[in-house]
Amino acid sequence: MNPASTFLAVGTDPGFSGRLSSTTIQIEWRDDRSNALKNGRKSIMDLLSRFYFFYSRIIKTIKIYLLLAGPGLIVMIADNDAGGITTYAATGAKFGFSLIWFLVLLGPVAYFVQEMTVRLGAVTKHGHAEAIFSAFGSFWGWFSLLDLTIVNWLTMITEFIGMTAALSIFGVPPIIVVFFVILVMVSIVMSGRYWTWEKITMVFCLVNLIYIPAALLVHPSISDILRAGIVPNFPGGLHGELFFFLMANIGTTIAPWMIFFQQSAVVDKQMKEKDIPWGKFDTIVGAFFTVIVAVFVIIVTGTVLYGMNIESAAQAAQVIMGTHPWVGTLVAIGLFDAGFLGAICIALTSSWAFGEVFGWAHSLNYKVKEAFWFYIFYFFGLLTAGAVVLIPGAPLVLITLFVQVIAVTLLPAALVFLIILLNNEEIMGKYKNTLFDNITNITIVVCIIAVSSVYGISTLFPNLFG
Amino acid sequence: MVTFESVFGERIGSVIHESTDKITRINQKYATPKIKMSAGVKFALLLLRLYLIFLVGLLAYKFWTIVHGGT
């Protein structure tokens, strides 16, 4: 008999009133138990339905995110390009885990700068190059466009240096690497759909996480990482060499091409104002992963190569190969992937910028014959940058150093324009910078300009700061 | 009259001619900055110019020292 029917049976008993005192408790108890069970069932059903609703929302949110994810994630992970991986590898080898905290701090810095490009792109529907021309006139426009083109081209050379050096560890000749890389990069963009390009590039972004298993394979000491890496410290005091490494890490975190790339990608993806929160979230996820990759590179080299002077990630991979063949292989693959991601994004950045200013069709949603000059520019940039690496005796080290100096001439301008544009109510409307945005962003921009300038100058005059 | 076509030949000359025309049109299109030149904006742009002049000066000095046998 179920509790409900028991209650009814007792309630209709003619002798019920005579046995009131003894039965009431029983009835009430039965009543309570019945209600509790009913409530229990109800609450379980309620809990299940709530869980299902929550689960559906999560799945729906993930689906929406996967549709809108892209520019932020790609730009942030591509930020860990060949030069970036080299910087992290050298930092880990030199200072062990001691500067992990510093790299963690650089994540939010990168986010706050890149988040502005999401808003600017989504509101104006113009890339950064076009926005500068339009807002500040042709002098600043040409300066930014030409400087960007030079910096990007030189940076692409460094990406090819990284890729050829990485695969030379496996005995692949540079000419084969350059040929196949250009072939793959051209094939990816020729699909005529931005979406296809973006999702293929995101697969390469996933490969960038290869440093996580590499770090696990070297069995790092977790206690050492926590003890040395989490609490802010300057190993050996704030001396000239450490300062140079700090500047180099900041320099790899924010590069001029990133600002132009993300804004153009947001426009090409046709993101609207309502998509800004998703664009911001995408950038946060990207910043998280860029820090994760950087930290794990440091863990690898800090564990295996601590105390060594490493000049390139390829050299690090080669040395690691001697003691940990699998780890060396993963580091080399990661370096190749980093160079690949960097080159594909940087080449596109220049094409987008020129297309915006010259009025060419400049979208990955166009077929080659519809946006001929856009694709020619992309192809020409890759081809010439790749060709430089193949020239015997080309001054590759000088080029690598020169990139830092030229980047310093463009980065402050691009950042200042960004801040000014984001503060213009006519352009941005309700999406303009808030007071908090301005305090955060102006502080970050001033610090980046100061540090990158000192870094650029110290590259020109190595003995200036001791 | 010397034209691009007469110097570089018909085909290359016309490409250069079209490019210079295009650049002229871009310069005309963006001749006037659209952003309101408030005191803050003017000051930021002035600082930017000074900063770039300083950097170009440093680059020129470095070039001069390399040419004259320095490092």
Image (spheres, coloured by chain):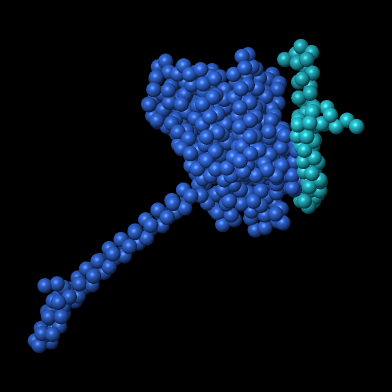
Chain colours: A blue, B cyan
Residue drawn at 55 percent across, 24 percent down: A178
Instruction: Spot the residue most to the left.
Output: A15
Q: In which quadrant of the rendered view does residue B5 lie?
A: top right
Q: Using residue A187 as the reference point, say whether residue A63 is left or right of it.
A: left
Q: Residue at x 82, y 31 (%)?
A: B4
Image quarter where the C terminus of chain A lies is top right
Give whichever of A455, A411 is nearer the camera: A411
Q: Is residue A155 above or below residue A357?
A: above
Total marks in image: 0
Counting from the top left corner in percent of width and height, residue A274 is at: 56, 57
| Residue A81 falls left or right of residue B67 | left
Q: Is residue A315 visible?
A: no
Among all residues in the image, which is located at the extreme front? Answer: B10
Residue for point 88% across, 30% down: B2
Residue A336 in the image, given as x and y percentages of width and height: 50, 27
**Is residue A177 at least partly visible in the picture?**
yes
Q: Quadrant of the N terminus of chain A?
A: bottom left
Q: Residue at x 57, y 45 (%)?
A: A365
Task: Pick the residue in front: A208 or B65.
Answer: A208
Where residue A125 sits in the image (x, y, percent)?
A: 64, 51
Vertical comparison of A129 with A19: above or below: above
Q: Quadrant of the rendered structure where residue A416 is?
A: top right
Residue A33 in picture, x, y percent from top left: 19, 70
* Extreme-top residue of the structure: B69
Left or right relative to A309: residue A40: left
Question: Quick one: which residue is furthest to the right in this view?
Answer: B1
